[in-house]
Amino acid sequence: MSHAKILEALRRAVAELDPNGSLLHNIFTRAQVLLELQGAEYFDEFWALYPTKTAKDVARKSWVRMDGDTYWPAIRKNILWRIRSNDWNPRDLDRRRFIPHASTYLNQRRWTDEMTIERTGAHKDF
């Protein structure tokens, strides 16, 4: 069951018990915080490994929404491959600008992209 469905079911159940909504707000807010924390066990490891540090909160929301913990082994492998293959060299300013924000990487499931080896001389200056 998705987080949104869980929160909606909780809202309906509490609304029946608390028609004026004072209790509902407190319970709903606490449930939302707990659900956001759930599924983010490996996010800090992901964030430490990811080469660009932009929009951490947005990336965390993407991680939770897509259940990043489930995909962590594949994500980790892909990020390490991209860094080692020089695809994402954080010290190379020319290449660094092509590293997507972490949320973009997660939302577009970029870890599922085919991993190819760049041939020497494949890039030419025009």
Image: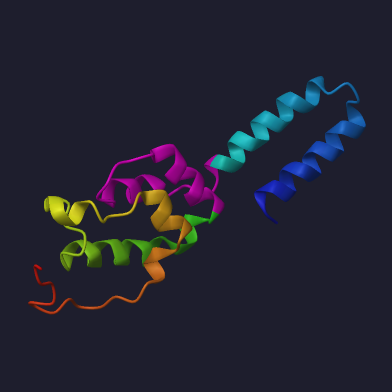
- Compared with 72, 56 (above or below) is above
Q: Which residues are magenta?
A: 37-65
Residue drawn where x is 23% and y is 51% of the image = 97
Q: Position of residue 99 (x, y in %)?
A: 27, 55
Residue drawn where x is 13% and y is 79% of the image = 119
- In this view, the residue in front, 80 or 89, is 89
Is the N terminus in the top left, top right, bottom left or bottom right quadrant? bottom right
- In this view, the residue in front, 107 or 84, is 107
- Compared with 108, 22 (above or below) is above
Position of residue 8 in the picture relative to residue 63 (left or right) = right
Q: Position of residue 28 (x, y in %)?
A: 72, 32
Q: Position of residue 81 (x, y in %)?
A: 24, 67
Position of residue 92 in the picture relative to residue 114 (left or right) = left
Find the residue positioned furthest to the front.
Answer: 126
State the image quarter where residue 12 is shown: top right
Q: Position of residue 88 (x, y in %)?
A: 21, 59
Position of residue 29 in the picture relative to residue 82 (left or right) = right
82 falls in the magenta region: no
Is the C terminus in the top left, top right, bottom left or bottom right quadrant? bottom left
- Compared with 90, 32 (above or below) is above
Q: How many marks?
A: 0
Q: Which secondary structure dominates the residues rendered in magenta?
A: helix
Residue drawn where x is 16% and y is 65% of the image = 84
